[in-house]
Image: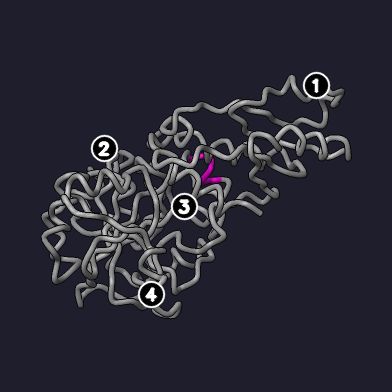
Amino acid sequence: MNPIEQALALLKAGKLVAIPTETVYGLGADARNPIAVQNVYLAKQRPSSNPLIIHIPHMNVLNDWAIDIPNTAFQLAKAFWPGPLTLILPRHPSVSKTITGGQESIAIRVPNHPLTLELLKRFDGGIAAPSANRYGRISPTTTEHVRTELGSRVDYILEGGACTLGIESTIVSLLEGAPIILRQGSISETDLSKVLKQPVYHQQWKTDAIKRENVLITPGSHFSHYAPTTPLYLCEKERLLETALHWARNNKRLCALSFSVPVNALLEHGVPDNCIAKWIVASDNPVLYAQKLYAYLHDFDATKSDCILIENPPNTEAWAAIRDRLQRAES
């Protein structure tokens, strides 16, 4: 039995299978099996009010999962699927509210990974698959990350190599009026606007005018998320060296991810080597940075250091998704 056949058999039997995507590894279950879906929540220790993303093989089955689908959904699906775009649409009555966190909306996308696309086509259904990690923790971009995070809670891991994008999908709500970005991803506001030829807004723009209890809950929407167990602090370029020296001079071990400050800058100030667990000079290319970000955080966490220092990325659209993840991971 080859890996796809093994994953297919286990999913049909109601088991949990970690699946590779271009964004992060997902913890997959048969979306039509309520017990399997419930086991995803239990394995992740995820609140039942937090909905799951349904992965489908192609846009032609959207009507099996959603109703009252606007034309904008098909425009975006045609432009970006398979790919890192999740659409929020009205839930089809046949879809269990266990998946949707009790809401009348559903999160759905077509992932862009050859193994998982083949699995989905042969599965002939939808796979509910949030990130394959404990709730709130760093998302996994390799099978090693999945094993470390979930261990025996996952029944099988479909090996698909390191994820090529490295951060979660852009989430866009199409429930009412103008499209609204609910989570930043590698598909930007500009990308979406070019396809739709209309403005695309962010959740903050929408929620300013409504009561908090009416805000739509979406995957990854909790303020504290994507976080290592080690305390993480964001620093402006001018403060990074000063902050690192403060920790080191207090005999603390640290890790750092910086664009501009090399580790030699600390050593020149007399900081002993044993105070620096890992110091990485990051790429200034946002695509390459995103690809490696979670792997860096997993590696930093494994050192059991006292803190992780991250130099703030540029405040531009190209870095928006990365800034979002780092701000949610900050202590």
Query: Closest to the observer: 60 or 245?
Result: 245
Residue 98 position (above or below residue 254): below
Residue 49 seen: yes
In this view, the mark in front (2 or 1): 1
Q: Which mark is residue 114?
A: 2
Question: Which quarter of the figure is the N terminus placed in?
Answer: top left
List x then y, in percent, for residue 186: 36, 42
Marks 1 and 2: in contact by CB < 8 Å?
A: no
- Observer-nearest of 170 and 189: 189
Determine crowd level at label 3: few under 14, some 14-19, many 20+ residues with C-alpha closer than 10 A: many
- Label 2, label 1: how far apart the Cα atoms are: 46 Å
- Where's residue 50, x and y in %? 43, 69
Question: What secondary structure is found at the residue carrying circle 3?
Answer: loop
Q: Which mark is residue 209?
A: 4
Compared with 14, 294 (above or below) is above
Dominant SS of magenta comes to helix
Q: CA distance from mark 3 to mark 1?
A: 38 Å
Of callouts 3 and 1, the N-terminal one: 3
Quarter of the picture holding the C terminus = bottom right
Q: Residues within 10 Å of mark 2 (few under 14, many from 20)?
A: some
Name which residue type carries label 1.
Leu
Q: Amino acid at mark 4?
A: Ala
Q: Is residue 330 left or right of residue 197?
A: right
- The residue where tag 1 is placed is 267
C-beta proximity under 8 Å, tags 4 and 1: no
Circle number at residue 132: 3
